[in-house]
Structure formats: C-alpha cells, structure tokens
Image (tube, rainbow, N blue to C red):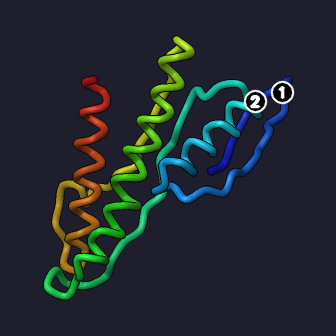
C-alpha cells in the first residue's frame, strides 16, 4: 500500500507491504497508516489480477485466487477504512477501480469480468449503506 500525505506544501510518500487478502495484515497496514498520518481520508482500491483461459479450463483454485484478490481484498480494505472514517466522524472517499468488462463478457476473461461486476455492485452497495 502506498501512503500519501500533503504536509506544508510537500508530498510525502510511504509504503506498507501487506497481503491484501489477509485481515490481520490489513489491520496492521491501517494501524501503520494511522500511526504515520493520524487519519485516513481516501482509499483507492486498485489491485487486481486476471486469468487468460477459457471458462472450461479455469480451475476452482484459479477462480478462488482471482476472487480473493479482485473482490475480497476490496471488501476487506473498504470495510476497515470505512470504520476508521466513521470513528473519526469526518467522512472520506473510497474509490474502487472496476472495468468496462464488468458490463461485457470477453472470451478467456469470464472470471475477471465476473469479479469486476462484483466490484461495481459492491461499490454501489457500499454507497447505499
């Protein structure tokens, strides 16, 4: 995760290495962010992976891995950061990067298209809540 801060006219950048599919590591990443910058005002979920094979050749293990990175990780980070934003009572922005492929199917990309459709729907759901 890349951490950015605007302080006295200078951009500050810091990095935290974490497994974005692991709740404990996400908690550690957020704790380090709060320690360093005291708050979180924006989260951009941009990590993703893809598979390049037909649906019939995609294993359940490959499907699970892609969904873990492309959907579950966004859910976990968004949930954790939204909790901080609510506790600090200032609101904030959570931006989830999806794809036009959320709305169209492409040969050898069905798991990716499905995951991006899930991200789009999850983002709408988060906004509703």
User: Is residue 109 shown left or right of residue 80?
Assistant: left
Residue 124 vertical position relative to residue 26 in the rendered view, above or below = above
Position of residue 78 measured from the top left corner of the image (x, y, whole percent): 43, 38
Q: Nearer the viewer, mark 1 or mark 2?
A: 2
Asked whether 74 or 105 is in front, the reply is 74
Asked if residue 127 is positioned above or below residue 61 in the image, the reply reads above
In the picture, the disc for residue 9 is: 1
Give the residue at x 26% y 34%: 124
Give x and y (percent) for residue 58: 23, 82
Determine contact: label 1, label 2, CB under 8 Å: yes
Residue at the (70%, 39%) spot, across then down: 32
Check disc 1 and report its element: helix, strand or loop.
Answer: loop
Q: How many marks?
A: 2
Identify the secondary structure beneath mark 2.
Answer: strand
- Relative to residue 85, is residue 7 drawn left or right? right
Question: To which residue does mark 2 refer?
Answer: 6
């Amino acid at each position: 995760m890349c951490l950015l801060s605007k302080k006295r006219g200078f951009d500050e950048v810091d990095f935290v290495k974490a497994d974005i599919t692991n709740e404990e590591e996400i908690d550690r990443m957020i704790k380090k962010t709060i320690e360093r910058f005291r708050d979180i005002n924006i989260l951009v979920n941009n990590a993703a992976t893809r598979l390049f094979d037909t649906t019939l050749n995609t294993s359940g293990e490959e499907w699970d891995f892609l969904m873990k990175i492309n959907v579950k990780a966004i859910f976990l980070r968004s949930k954790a950061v939204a909790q901080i934003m609510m506790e600090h009572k200032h609101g904030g922005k959570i931006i989830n990067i999806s794809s036009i492929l959320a709305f169209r199917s492409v040969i050898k990309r069905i798991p990716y298209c499905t995951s991006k459709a899930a991200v789009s729907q999850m983002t709408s759901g988060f906004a509703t809540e």
